[in-house]
Image (spheres, helix red, strand yellow):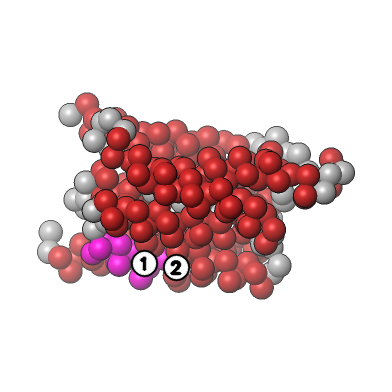
Amino acid sequence: MPLWLEVAITVLVGVATGVLSGMFGIGGAVISTPAIRALGATALQAIGSTLPSILPSSIAGSLRYRRENMIRPRIVVLTSSLGVPASIVGSRLSDAVPGNGHALMILTALLVAYTGYRTAFPTVRTLERSGKPLSDEWWRLAVIGLAAGMLSGLLGIGGGILMVPAFLAWVGLPLKETIATSLACVGIFAIPGTLTHWYLGHINWTFAAALAVGVIPGARLGAHFTINAADRVLRYSVGAALGIIAVIYGAGEVLALIN
């Protein structure tokens, strides 16, 4: 495939990635990772090369959400306090997982499926209904940050795959605030993960730069959809989209592992 065509396709993938990121608060790598694998990236390059595009996607979408006062800054700070160092640890461990990266891709598919199910059919625990102030939830946020940061570095998916269902079902944020707050955290987690994967030589900068070009307009479009969508429509849209992606994603990696 000519380089110009590869770059053009990757930019379009970046737009789709940005839309998914802005809509669902999950980083969007569930699209970009298998897409650049199909375009020739190795499994570890597919993990590392998506992270540099997560930051501009997060910034573009978060600025739109901030205008609507949907981001919870204290939750971002508390979640990121352990998420950032955990992201570095996860990035360092990516080489140690057996299966030449395929096992990590299959794990990602399972997490995508879980997130889709939990978002469409949540077990909601609201802070308002529980009567507890946010300060009493710090340990939940610390655990979420630790796990999400580890996944961000290990799988290159930004951590939103875990934060979205956790903020909904475990902390009890409303859906739109969950998406907006998760997206802000995703951008912070991507910084140390990007630097560590760069050091490890896992980033193909042609793919990374092309994705970054596309994600910015895509994230703004995705955030606009979420802000104006009814909660019920948004839940089922997230669940259906992620379920389809998980099946396609997981099946492709299982076949690659077998072959």
Residue drawn at x 70%, y 35% is: 123
* Relative height, residue 23 to residue 160 (above, below): below
Do the numbered discs 1 and 2 sit on residues whose CB atoms are within 8 Å? yes
Residue 25 percent coordinates (x, y): 55, 54
Q: Is residue 39 left or right of residue 226?
A: left
- Near-viewer residue (29 or 255): 29
Residue 109 percent coordinates (x, y): 41, 37
Residue drawn at x 57%, y 53% is: 80
Residue drawn at x 48%, y 45% is: 86
SS for dot 2: helix
- Near-viewer residue (199 or 17): 199
Residue 19 percent coordinates (x, y): 47, 61
Q: Main structural element of the magenta stretch: helix, strand or loop?
A: helix
- Nearer the N terminus, badge 1 or badge 2? 2
Residue 55 percent coordinates (x, y): 45, 64
Query: Mark 1 packing: few (<14 Cα in 10 Å), some, or many (20+)?
Result: many
Question: How many numbered marks does the figure carry?
Answer: 2
In the image, residue 179 lies in the stretch drawn in magenta: no
Residue holding disc 1? 212
Highlighted magenta segment, given as a residue range: 205-215
Residue drawn at x 84%, y 40% is: 130
- Near-viewer residue (210 or 5): 210
Q: What type is the residue that disc 2 sits on?
A: Pro
User: Which disc number belongs to residue 240?
Assistant: none
Q: What type is the residue that disc 1 sits on?
A: Ala
Residue holding disc 2? 56
* Relative height, residue 114 to residue 216 (above, below): above
